[in-house]
Structure formats: structure tokens, C-alpha cells
Image: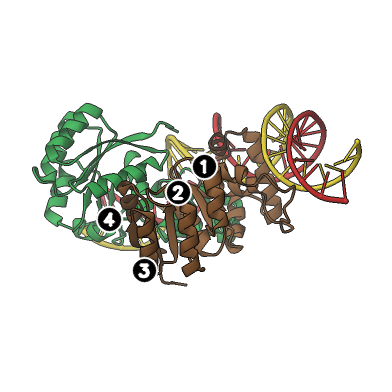
Chain colours: A green, B brown, C yellow, D red
Amino acid sequence: MTRNPRTVVVADDHPIVLSGMRLLLSGSRFFEFAGEARTGAEAILRCDQLRPDVLLLDLRLPDLPAATICQRVKERQPDLAIVILTAHPEEMAVRQCLKAGASACLFKDTGEQQLLSALMQVVHGRAVLDPRIAGAMLPRRANGGRPEGSLTDRERDVLMMIARGLTTQEIGEQLGLSPNTIKSHSRALFTKLGAHNRVQALAVAQERGLI
Amino acid sequence: MTRNPRTVVVADDHPIVLSGMRLLLSGSRFFEFAGEARTGAEAILRCDQLRPDVLLLDLRLPDLPAATICQRVKERQPDLAIVILTAHPEEMAVRQCLKAGASACLFKDTGEQQLLSALMQVVHGRAVLDPRIAGAMLPRRANGGRPEGSLTDRERDVLMMIARGLTTQEIGEQLGLSPNTIKSHSRALFTKLGAHNRVQALAVAQERGLI
DNA sequence: CGGCGCCTCACCCGTTCGGGTGAGGGACGT
DNA sequence: ACGTCCCTCACCCGAACGGGTGAGGCGCCG
């Protein structure tokens, strides 16, 4: 319900990424490109100055290790969400960042919509790990090795039926379940997709190639 | 179903736009950033060299009028789709470009997903005009031979915004209209599409290739 | 001019959705 | 055995949606 855009600071030594992110964020009504940094020191400074909601942090900056930056920034702003961006999966560095308070880790080849949706999830308090690194990151887990943030079987069922234009009631009949159950699954998948309603969920799912 | 990605050449004198487009296109499995140009002459050259499917063309380039570029390029490659990008709505220039064979005109503040969706439509042979310029572009016609049962401009606008996951309220704000008006358009297009709700409308529109 | 289509907006009403909370049972791994 | 996750279902409530009806303005065509 918070209609104010979340402010984002982007820290990356590649200008092309900065401009790309600026464009990307300016295209979303949910986010605002608040500032940029090309070094770790600058990133810490910008966060102090601008008090953003999110720090988008390149894993490799010329001056400081990303984990150090995470730690420093988190000391000052525990509520800041940190999203790590990396070109190559460097397990150790990523693990250290997560330990230091980062909320998410994404690859630089992540699609725009996925990136936005991941940011959306992060500002809603969820952690997001790129599937390609999530496996290495989480050898544990009680569930069937399902990647963080992906949908359960039931949620996928419901998503498909939503995509076909069925109402909650109809989906319940189709699956032989109570409408309440369908609503539960809907809510769950909306949260996972960072959507506020079923149409947004479809938009996100489409971008992710889920449907 | 898995087609080859459509190749795109981007012509713009703002590097930031080029890099933004490169990032955007590389995030879509439907398109490939084939090349870039900073001048009109370079754009024509690149199209000759690369034979792309789409030319994304800034309305204002330092050396040549966009309409001239459209004409030159179309002479050599009639099948090339040209999409005009503009920061400000310059009616005359846009009109000339369309007359010279451009397939679409979009504003530079167009969101990523809208832009991609517009490109998608263009490569499928449809014309796309930004709503803000479409009005000025088409002062003609009470019903300019619109096929029976097809959507009006406004209805299409609303449909697109519905597809992006916006609520009735948000669409109204976006278009500067009352929510009541949006509801009227929604009802109209639902009826035309034989849908009972917006999700069904999207399903139908998708089947018919409207989006 | 008069009709028609489109765009605009209003009000009312019932249904559906989205969000919050709580809870029980089953499956599985530690 | 315990924890965790998933699936199931319930109730409540406010917001959004879908449908009906009516109406004024505008532009175009006959």
C-alpha cells in the first residue's frame, strides 16, 4: 500500500550498469534511482547522505570487499536492504555478504523484470537468491531442494488457472478445493512474485517464463 | 515456438539510451541488440551491414531528419520495422516518419515492459503509437474503417495498462481520467472480447495477438 | 441538421479479490 | 521426536472489480 517509491542507490564500477539501472528504475513507479557510486567508499558515503531503501551493490568494487561494505552500511542503517550484483558466482564472497546482512544476490545477466521483481520482494522483506547460486549457498534445507522464491506445485497450478481467466471460485471447483484454499495459494504466490494482484502476478510470471 | 531473437539496431545520440537499450534488450529472449548508431548516417550504414529486424530510431539525430533516415532505410529494406523514439511529441516530424514507413512512435519515458511489448507488436506487423501522440496523430475519422468488434484507441490503451497490472484507479491517474471512465472502457472492451473480468480479457487478447 | 460513435463521467449495487490471522494434518529430513 | 514446509480450510474486512443505467460533449458523415 505504500505508494511512495523506494529509493535505490546503485554502486558499480561499470558506468554502463549505472545508466542501465537508472533507466530501469526510472521506468518503475515503485522505485526511484536516488544515487550512484563507483567505489565502495563512495557507496558508504552515498548511503549515509541519501538514506536509501535499497543498496544495489556490485560484488567487486575497486577499493573494498563487498562484505566490508555491507557490514559498514548495515551498522549505520540496519533497515537498509542490500542486493548483491555479481557477474560470476564467487561463492565465498557472496556467502560473506549474506552473513554481513545482504538480502539478495543476483547475477548481472538477470533480466530487467526479474531484477525489478527481486527488488520488489526485497523491499517487502524477502530474501532473493539467484537459482544458480542458491544451490551452492544452501546445501541444507528440509524441502525438496526447491530454489528460494520459486513456486510450489499447488501455487503453480493456481497460477496457471488464473492465467486462463478463472476466478477463485472456479479454480476451487476445478481442483476440488475450497475457495479459501485457493485464496491462500494465491496470496502465497503473489508474495513470492512481488505482485499485488493476479494481473501483476501474470505480468511477472510472463517475464520469468513461468507461463 | 522458440524463434530466433529479432535483431535490433538502436540509433540515438545519447549513449545512456544506447546502453539502457542494450541492457533492456539483452534481458529479453525475444530480442537481440545487434548494433548501435549515434548519427543518422551511421544508422543507415548499420542497417545495411547488419540487416536487423528492427531499427529503433531517435527522432532527433545530429545530422539527418528522422524521416529522411526512415525513407533511405526503407528503400533498401522494405521489411525492416522502424520504431521512432522521441523525448517530446513533435507532431510534424512524427507524422513524416510514419509517412516514410515507420511502424511505431514511442516516448522515451516509456517503461521497459511497454517498450518491449511495443517492439513485440511491431515485429508482428502491427503499428504502435504512444497514446499521448496517437490523439494528435489521428484527428481524422469518426470510425476510420475500424473492423467490426475491434477495440477503440482508448480501449486499447486501457487494455495495455491492465496487462501491466495497473488497477482501475492507477490507470485513471496515468491517463488523467476519472476511474469511472476507465471502468466504462473496461466494460466496453470486456464485452467486445467476451470476457467477464480483466484476466479473461488478457487471455483472449493474447490469443488474438492483441498484446 | 440529425444521427452515430467515441470519450467522458456519475451513481448504485452485488461480487470478487487481497490481506490478516489462525489452525489442523501430513510428509520429510535431522 | 521435532521442526519445517506444504496443503488444507476458516472467518473477517476493506478495497477493487463487474454490471447496469444515464448523461453531456464532440466530431464526422449522410
Inspect the image, locate mark 3, and give the three-letter code of the amino acid beneath it: Leu
In the structure shown, which secondary structural element does the residue marked by tag 1 occupy?
A: loop
Please state the horizontal and vertical placement of residue B6, each as a whole percent of the image. Answer: 42, 66
What residue is shown at x 14% (from left), y 45% (from top)? A66
Between B181 and A104, the one lying in front of the other is B181
* Residue A111 visible to an observer of this rendering: no
Residues at marks 4 and 1, CA–CA distance in whole angstroms: 43 Å
The vertical placement of B1 against A163, above or below, is below
Direction from residue A95 to residue B36 in the image, left or right: right
From the image, state whether disc 4 or disc 3 is nearer to you. Answer: 3
For the question of whether residue B17 can be seen, the reply is: yes
Q: CA distance from mark 3 to mark 1?
A: 29 Å
The numbered disc on residue B155 is none
Q: To which chain does the residue with label 1 belong?
A: B
Q: Nearer the viewer, residue A10 or B45?
A: B45
Residue located farthest toward the left when viewing the structure as drawn: A63
Q: Circle 4 sits in a helix, a strand or a loop, which is it?
A: loop
Q: Nearer the viewer, residue B56 or B120?
A: B56
Crowdedness near tag 2: few (<14), some (14–19) or many (≥20) residues, C-alpha within 10 Å:
many
Q: Mark 1 sits on what residue?
A: B90
Image point (51%, 46%), residue name? B165
Sequence-first disc among 2 and 3: 3
Please, what is the three-letter code of the amino acid marked with disc 4? Asp
The residue type indicated by label 2 comes to: Leu
In this rendering, the label closer to the viewer, 2 or 4: 2
The spot of residue B59 in percent (x, y) is 45, 48
Marker count (numbered): 4
Q: Which residue is mark 4?
A: A130
Looking at marks 1 and 2 on the same chain, the residue that comes earlier in the sequence is marked by 2
Mark number for residue B59? 2
